[in-house]
Image (cartoon, rainbow, N blue to C red):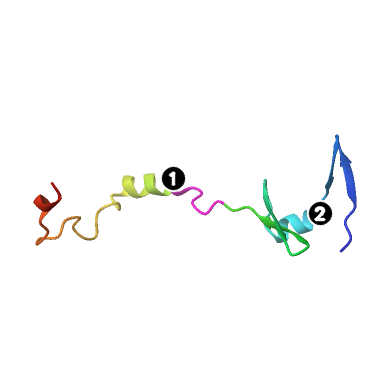
Amino acid sequence: MDISVIPIGNSKGIRLSKTLLEKYNITDKVELILEKGYIILKPKTAPRKDWEKAFEKMHKNGDDVLLINNVFEDENLEEWS
C-alpha cells in the first residue's frame, strides 16, 4: 500500500484511512518502532483502562473481599521489627 507524505505545518506526516484506523483499532496515539530499516506503527493501548471504574463497581457490590488471609497463621511478625 502506498501512502503519500504530506505537509503538516513545518513538518510532514502521513494520513491513514478510516478503514486502517478501524481495522487496527487506532484511536488517539500510535507507538513508533524503528527496527532494522523499517518503521512500524503499533496501536497504543492502555491495558489498565477503566480499572478504576471496575474497582468502584466491585466495592459497591461488595465483591472486593480478600480471598485468602493477608497474614498466615504461623507467620512471626516480630522478626520483622
Residue drawn at x 74%, y 55% is 21
Magenta stretch encompasses residue 59: no
Q: Nearer the viewer, residue 23 or 48?
A: 48
Binning the other alpha carbons within 10 Å of mark 2 as few (below 14), some (14 to 19) or many (20 upward) gives: few
Of pointers 1 and 2, the one earlier in the residue sequence: 2
Q: Nearer the viewer, residue 7 or 80?
A: 80
**Magenta highlight range:** 46-51
Residue drawn at x 32%, y 49% is 61
Magenta stretch encompasses residue 48: yes
Vertical placement of residue 40 versus 46, above or below: below
The three-letter code of the residue at mark 1 reads Lys
* 16 relative to 62 in the view: left or right: right
**Picture quarter with the N terminus:** bottom right
Q: Which residue is mark 2?
A: 17
Instruction: Name which quarter of the figure residue 74 lies in.
Output: bottom left
| Residue 53 numbered mark, or none | 1
Q: Position of residue 9 (x, y in %)?
A: 85, 34
Q: CA distance from mark 1 to mark 2?
A: 32 Å
The three-letter code of the residue at mark 2 reads Ser
Q: Position of residue 50 (x, y in %)?
A: 49, 47
Q: Position of residue 55 (x, y in %)?
A: 38, 48
Binning the other alpha carbons within 10 Å of mark 1 as few (below 14), some (14 to 19) or many (20 upward) gives: few
Q: Secondary structure at mark 2?
A: loop
Q: Position of residue 67 (x, y in %)?
A: 24, 60
